[in-house]
């Protein structure tokens, strides 16, 4: 390695080319800053290469496959609809490549300096970037750490086995496991369970007894019901005791809620694991940056860390590990650097899960209403009463709206059902605008559409949904 | 709501400048009550109210020039009145219960520490360094609106202003005169003229003694005719002999247009500024007619009642500053005319008469500016010589009568 002593000056260096990092770089260019983006592997980060995007390729395929009986109802039959996992993996690779090329092109068009290599802080404003035999030093006015997070196996998983898969591994598996064990309550675990069940696996999902599922209680209930309906076995797990690799699979011993030791066998075990910040390689900890107990960087409302002019965004910081948060923070950090006054408020960051059917949840849940004694109106409109859901044979699920009885301000919107992900754009908009019931009832909604379910749920708050039986 | 638009008040006007509003938001107005002063070219006009009602909104700022058809004011006509009073009561009750309302919101424990304001409203607060949580909401639900934030900013500013006044030495603010309306119009025209026309000014003097005697005689006979009326007559006669000064340079088509109409503009001082009403076809009018028209137009100019037509199409202009004083000036030509003449104060001075005696003469100085692109100095002197000759020997004017 040749250590160059010549340091190059840079206005803004962003470490990490995930959705937060590249969004920040592009916004910086738009605001007239010259930005340098350092990526040690591939642009797009976890989200594009091994997280959200690959999992969506799988959930999309699972959704299509699940439509098979319905297609026959529509008179579409006789087509060879065999599922081929290798074809899907090729498709996934193609999509990821296409999206990554798009990001590279955008970076180029925005004249962003893109450097591949591993970045390490040499001191608070100097960064060394190592790439093979090359080592460049940059003196930076401002730095944004956007290095993301990585999953780690739970401590109970003591063995290292090719039969135990993390998120980035399961979507590369060239087979559909006969028996898939899924451990985790987060969105990827739920998506894995849901889509592999649809793709042909027998799935057993272990759900943490104490924390349960992270949604409104009605959603939790409906999701579990639908899992059961799709022959997904549910195990309320109290504690993971041990794992063991067998000749053709893996076994998992847990303490179940019946206070019994139970052992389950499967061909593979999927574990969400715990996501930990990618901070060590940056060497920033040496300079005393404030971190929480798990190592996540603490930032203020301007995304600035405890070290002046070093900012941090996305998974490497505290809070939810979601691309939407990283993108928001990335843009905000750059706006702060260029003298603006942005605000990041994650109150209404929606929780989205691409299960079959998908879930979109934002705002106060019914549990919150009970816990805080909020005087609220609640209405759940079943999708089976929605005309468009009937046409498309997607009548499972519901839309639930919670509003404040005194002010009629909408507090939370939760949906499980086809169209939930796209409709969530409306949910967040309404909540951010502090919409009242009338604000939601006033517009004309496309007919027929899933969206009508939203407005009927609001009308239902005062017993005026047209397609709901009167409440006695 | 009744919308008051700028409509065509002159002859084919296309735009007008909003000079001044005669009402403000909240004022009660009656039908035909003047609402707004509008300036077109050089005429000021008032737009009347089409209905009785209350002024709800003023849209265009004074000083702005807008096209005909642009909405200027919204008036809530008395037809809508019931609605208005209803809203009013509502507002009052809201105002009275603001504090209660906010308490009401506080009471509901908010597990998300949610901000009850739309993203734009929040940005507005942020950009003004205001914590949105401190802004009181007029909406009972606690939802903070853009108006709430603006009100809060204003209130803060007033408080700050008072604080500043306490510690600061009071700085005298200079008086301001709005630079708009006629003043701005004058500026525009003067700039255009001076930047386009190479001006030459020459000075001369005229012995007014004979004219004054003649006027005295006429006055005794019962006809008091003002001096400018004679000037205008003499000018038309001189202009017919020197048509180059009743002309307009048409640079685009490489020609000088010698005009066959003799429309004489005369500069008139008004409280708003300089106006130039026009005596049309002065050559076809008697001195007496000219005299009466001068009085009439001057009055209209002073009272701001001139119509657009009465200020248009002059072919030559004069400025009679004599009554105010002065001995000479370098007047700016009334573009696109070719020349302009100023008459200064007539003073008693010793002069040598034809008999080589020193006598008292009434001598008036004059300044004539002309466009050197169009005419030359010798022609200009010949022109003023002819004019002076007519004024010094006013009986010659008789010879020109048709």
Image (cartoon, coloured by chain):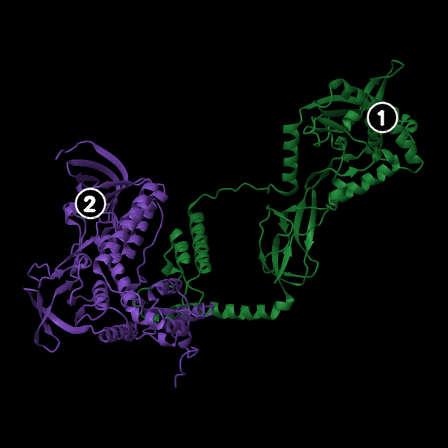
Chain colours: A purple, B green
**Which residue does the numbered mark 1 point to in the structure image?**
B391
Q: Residues within 10 Å of mark 1 (few under 14, many from 20)?
A: many
> Element under label 2?
loop
Q: Is residue B171 visible?
A: yes
Residue at x 24% of width, y 34% of height: A8
Residue at x 66% of width, y 37% of height: B186
Q: Is residue A382 visible?
A: no
Q: Which quadrant of the figure contains the N terminus of chain B?
A: bottom right
B279 vs A430, nearest the viewer:
A430
Q: Residue A384 vs residue A5: left or right?
A: right
Check the image and report above or below for A273 versus A390: above
B80 vs B101, nearest the viewer:
B80
A340 vs A463, nearest the viewer:
A463
Counting from the top left corner in percent of width and height, residue B313 is at 75, 37
**Which residue does the numbered mark 2 point to in the structure image?**
A40
Q: Where on the picture, by quarter, is residue B27?
A: bottom right
Q: Mark number for residue A164?
A: none
Check the image and report above or below for B123 versus A5: below
């Amino acid at each position: 390695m040749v250590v160059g002593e010549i340091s190059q000056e840079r206005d803004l260096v962003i470490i990490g080319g995930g959705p937060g990092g590249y969004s920040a770089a592009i916004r910086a260019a738009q605001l007239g800053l010259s930005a340098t983006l350092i990526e040690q592997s591939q642009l797009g980060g976890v989200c594009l290469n091994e997280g959200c995007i690959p999992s969506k390729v799988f959930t999309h395929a699972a959704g299509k496959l699940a439509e098979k009986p319905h297609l026959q109802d529509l008179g579409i039959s006789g087509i060879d609809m065999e599922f081929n996992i290798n074809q899907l993996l090729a498709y996934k690779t193609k999509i990821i490549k296409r999206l990554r090329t798009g990001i590279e092109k955008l970076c180029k068009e925005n004249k962003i300096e893109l450097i591949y290599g591993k970045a390490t802080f040499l001191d608070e404003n100097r960064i060394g970037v190592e790439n093979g035999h090359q080592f460049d030093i940059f003196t930076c006015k401002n730095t944004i750490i956007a290095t993301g997070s990585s999953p780690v196996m739970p401590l109970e998983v003591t063995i290292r086995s090719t039969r135990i898969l993390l998120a980035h591994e399961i979507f590369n598996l060239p087979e559909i496991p006969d028996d898939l064990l899924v451990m985790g309550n987060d969105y990827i675990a739920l998506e894995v369970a849901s889509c592999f069940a649809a793709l042909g696996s027998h799935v057993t999902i272990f759900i943490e007894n104490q924390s349960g599922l992270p949604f409104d209680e009605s959603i939790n209930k409906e999701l579990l019901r639908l899992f059961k309906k799709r022959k997904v076995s549910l195990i309320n797990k109290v504690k993971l005791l041990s794992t063991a690799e067998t000749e053709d699979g893996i076994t998992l011993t847990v303490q179940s809620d019946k206070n019994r030791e139970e052992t389950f066998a499967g061909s593979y075990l999927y574990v969400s694991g715990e996501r930990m910040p990618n901070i060590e390689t940056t060497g920033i900890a040496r300079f005393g940056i404030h971190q929480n107990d798990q190592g996540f960087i603490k930032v203020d409302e301007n995304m600035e860390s405890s070290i002046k002019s070093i900012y941090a965004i996305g998974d490497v910081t505290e809070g939810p590990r979601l691309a939407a948060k990283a993108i928001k923070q990335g843009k905000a950090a750059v706006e702060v650097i260029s003298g603006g006054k942005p605000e990041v408020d994650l109150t209404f960051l929606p929780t989205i899960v691409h299960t079959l059917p998908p879930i979109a949840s934002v705002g106060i849940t019914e549990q919150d209403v009970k816990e805080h004694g909020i005087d609220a109106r609640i209405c759940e409109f079943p999708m089976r009463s929605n005309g468009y859901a009937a046409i498309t044979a997607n009548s499972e699920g519901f839309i639930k709206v919670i509003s404040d009885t005194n002010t009629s301000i909408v507090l939370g919107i939760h949906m499980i059902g086809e169209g939930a992900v796209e409709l969530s754009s409306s949910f967040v908009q309404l909540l951010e605008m502090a919409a009242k019931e009338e604000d939601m009832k006033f517009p004309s909604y496309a007919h027929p559409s899933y969206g009508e379910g939203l407005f009927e749920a609001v009308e239902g708050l005062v017993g005026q949904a047209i397609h709901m039986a009167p409440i006695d | 709501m009744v919308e008051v638009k700028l409509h065509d008040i002159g002859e084919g006007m296309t735009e007008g400048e909003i000079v001044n509003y005669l009402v403000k938001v909240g004022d009660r107005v009656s039908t035909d009550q003047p609402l707004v002063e509008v300036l077109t070219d050089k005429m000021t006009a008032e737009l009347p109210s089409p209905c009785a009602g209350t002024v709800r909104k003023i849209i265009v700022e004074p000083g702005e020039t807008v096209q005909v058809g642009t909405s200027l004011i919204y008036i809530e006509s008395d037809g809508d009145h019931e609605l208005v009073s209803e809203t009013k009561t509502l507002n009052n009750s809201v105002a009275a219960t603001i504090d209660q309302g906010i308490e009401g919101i506080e009471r509901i424990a908010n597990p998300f520490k949610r901000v009850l304001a739309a993203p734009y409203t929040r940005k507005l607060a942020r950009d003004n360094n205001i914590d949105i949580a401190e802004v009181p909401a007029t909406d009972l639900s606690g939802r903070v609106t853009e108006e709430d934030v603006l009100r809060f900013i204003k209130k803060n500013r007033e408080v700050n202003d008072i604080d500043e006044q306490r510690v600061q030495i009071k700085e005298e603010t200079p008086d301001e005169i709005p630079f708009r309306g006629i003043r701005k119009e004058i500026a525009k025209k003067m700039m255009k003229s001076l930047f386009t026309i190479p001006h030459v000014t020459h000075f001369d003097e005229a012995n007014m003694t004979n004219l004054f005697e003649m006027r005295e005689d006429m006055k005794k006979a019962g006809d008091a005719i003002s001096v400018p009326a004679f000037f205008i007559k003499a000018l038309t006669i001189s202009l017919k002999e020197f048509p180059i000064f009743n002309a307009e340079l048409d640079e685009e088509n490489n020609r000088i247009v010698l005009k066959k109409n003799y429309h004489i503009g005369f500069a008139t001082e008004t409280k708003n500024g300089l106006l130039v009403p026009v005596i049309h076809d002065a050559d076809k009018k008697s001195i007496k007619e000219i005299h009466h028209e001068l009085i009439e137009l001057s009055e209209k100019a002073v009272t701001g009642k001139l119509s657009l037509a009465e200020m248009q199409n002059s072919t030559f202009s004069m400025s009679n500053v004599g009554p105010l004083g002065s001995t000479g000036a370098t007047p700016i030509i009334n573009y696109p005319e070719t020349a302009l003449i100023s008459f200064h104060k007539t003073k008693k001075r010793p002069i040598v008469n034809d008999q080589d005696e020193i006598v008292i003469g009434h001598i008036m100085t004059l300044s004539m500016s002309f466009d050197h692109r169009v005419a030359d100095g010798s022609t200009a002197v010949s022109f003023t010589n002819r004019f002076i000759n007519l004024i010094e020997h006013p009986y010659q004017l008789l010879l020109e009568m048709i």
